[in-house]
Image: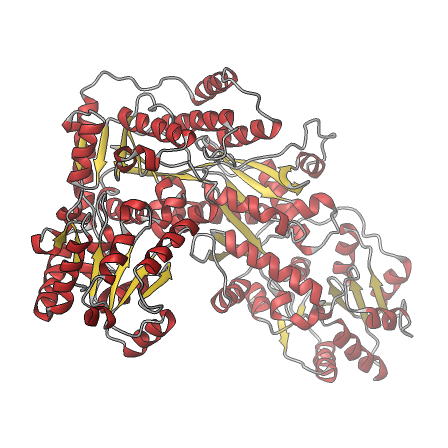
Amino acid sequence: MKLLLDLQGAQSQSRHRGIGRYTLALTRAFLDRAASEHDVRLLLNARFGDQVDALIATLGEHARPAHRLVVEVPEGIRAQPGGNAWLRRTSARVMRHAIESSGADIVWYSSILEGYNDDAVVPETSPVGIASVATLYDLIPLHDQDAYLGHPRIRQWYGQSVDMLKQCDMLLAISEWVRQDAIQRLQLPPERVVNIGAAVDDWFAPPTPDPAASAALRSRYGITRPYVLYNGGFDARKNVPSLVRAFAALPEAMRAAHQLVIVGRAGQEEAAQLHEATRKARLPADSVIYTGFAPDEELIRLYAECALFVFPSLLEGFGLPPLEAMACGAPVIASHAASLPEVIDKRDALFNPHRVDDITACMSQALGNAHYADELRKYGCERAPMFSWNSVANRALDALQELAHRQNRRPNVAIHGNPLAREEQLIADISRMDGKPSDEDLASIASMVISTRKPEAVQRWLVDVSSIAEKDIRTGVQRVVRNILTHWLISPPEGVQIVPIRFARGRYRHARQYAFELLGREKNPLPEDAIEAVNGDVFFGLDWAVDAIDAAEPQLRQWHRRGASVQFLIHDLLPIMLPNAFHPYARDRFARWLRCAATVSDNLICVSRATADDLNLWLATTSIRYQFGRAPEVTHSPPGVDPSFSSAEPVLRPLLAVALRSRPTFLMVGTIEPRKGYDQALEALEQLWNDGIDVNLVVVGHYGWLMEPFRARLEAHAQYNRRLYWIHDANDDELDAIYRASTWLLAASWGEGYGLPLIEATLRNIPVIARDLPVFREVMGEQAQYFKAQQPSELADVLRNLLSLEDVPSPVKSFPTWQESAASLSSVIKNLISDESA
């Protein structure tokens, strides 16, 4: 059985009510019971973004991308304001298309009566070829239409929702009373309405005694005496004013010895009515306490420690608060109306809610008779476990399987045709709908349609090149981007389409022009239009797009919810690990980028094991609110090198060429920035020159930041362009020539993400002297000389000893080529994606 479970009942405003609690609890139990036997997928409304994220986090492996359909619903389709008929009807039609395209046998709506005050949406008619099921909580508005459906707009909306209920092949009622009410009022065959019941969450249980916590809770709410408790809603059927009057009618001594504590969210009008009831009852100011909403941990203790819980409701689909109170050990009495006798099932604990004196008498008996109160407590603790979510889930599964069996005996009416044809039919249907949609409406519906698409047979990797496509300044990070992307474009991973993208003008767009230039082709003839990810796509942050991340984060979150895998390549954590080597602004930008990447990512792939270790430490010690409640997986994949060298005769600048031929040379390659150790290296070389040692220091790299004094000192140095050289504009051929003419590569960095210059030198048989960093050890192993010098004099001694050696063996080590690196990185990504969907 293929089942699509619509979870809007746990996302909309209903999430604050019993519907939301019911939906989530039953969904968790149902998935644990049914997911191993059946294909159960989740339908989520992306308009409720934070709630989508929370549900994905809560449902864990059951909500993996392959198991969810997240639909981009337009804003402003709620029924309450009116004036949006075209957008509402069109959204309902697209939702039907999404369900029909899902391949499900059955769609189960967690709550059809949604969308009046928020942007929930269900089809106006049942999907073709798919059986429809809905959870039915009650039809209470039909009992008093003047009170509940007085406004024409709400009456129309409710009527349309009831029509959809009538179209369903099966309704799953939460109580027998609701079932019988639906059969009678909707005139449905009894076999189409099944009572699956309801239950109480496991955490509603007697709490561990904690006098300090109890005292703090009572103090916070102003509770100073034993109290009678109510928890629930405040609309007229809840009958709370009658409870206030019944409390006021207790014998004077009993009333004075107790307080009435009322828990729940009350609207302004409802609160005014309650305060008026209190005033008319002439109760002392501290007799009635309105707490407002109480979180579960407080509510459980309030339940457990009350003298009595009273539930006076006139109409109730099930009555969850009394069951919660019983589970927590409270003595409970309730009205004998509607479904409540099914929950309580104890005649002497039920009263007539229409008679205040009957409520008072029942309260007085429980408050004045300790033996009876204990009997109620014991009974509640025995009764509550009879209502379990596992039992509800089993009854629901039995009903769905029976429906699937009946459906299999019917003629096949499934939709035929390919997805494109179904989408074309959808667009044709929309074009015939009456109305004058705005451009914004049309764009919203287009986005909704796109979000319903299934994953393509060829998986798309949306590779972010935002920074390098704007400007290539030839940094080490950009060298990685160029080489990996080039190899992926020329030889894509099997079953993958590589799509370079960039963030521009508020959205991710195709980066076709950059891709064409990278491959040396003619000007791109295609537009740089916006791109949308669908379920099954992969976003890969190959580039370090620090300037785009803040604006791009909402779209990345949207894609992540939709089912795209989000991954970033992490080149280093240097601004965090070596904060003094970076400008405060740069540190803050980097930290913001990394925090965002970690927040929205499934995986973070580092260029080295050492960087991965740094990242794991940072994640473990940093407070981050991850989008789906779990930290990303951290792994590593090393970059490559180009083993081929220029075939042309090395061309060096005349002065430099003479110097390199005349004396030994220490070569340093990298951006001029504080962490590179250039200042220490220069001071060490100065000591050698002062000692009469004839040696060169050659620096190749762009000027970076925070090194103005060093730059001025370098350019004004007595040895500048004699034995000290700074080449800030070398191309690849000239750098190759400098490498081959040098004696040693000196890597004096205080921190690195990887260390490509060490590899480039090794490939040219140039010995390497490097600071003893974990990442350098990882890259070079035993094929380098290491130093720990903290002072220039210590480094001078190390270099002096090196120059005294008669024979320095050339390093012998193999490294992955860029082609191998690109292949390795794609394998890592594929494995991570496979783990996500497993």
Q: Quadrant of the C terminus?
A: top left
x, y (%) of residue 555?
A: 56, 43
Quick check: can you spot residue 463? yes
Q: Quadrant of residue 689?
A: bottom right
Q: Quadrant of residue 36?
A: top left
Residue lying at 18% horizontally and 67% vertically, measured from the top left: 251
521 over 480 or under it: above or below: above
Looking at the image, residue 726 sits to the left or right of residue 369; the answer is right
x, y (%) of residue 70?
A: 43, 38
x, y (%) of residue 242?
A: 25, 53
Looking at the image, residue 313 sits to the left or right of residue 122; the answer is left
Report the front residue among 157 and 417: 157
Colour scheme: secondary structure
Q: Quadrant of residue 383?
A: bottom left
Report the front residue among 576 and 589: 589
Report the front residue among 818 and 708: 708
Q: Quadrant of the N terminus?
A: top left
x, y (%) of residue 318?
A: 21, 45
Looking at the image, residue 384 sits to the left or right of residue 529; the answer is left
Query: Total label count?
Result: 0
Quick check: can you spot residue 762? no
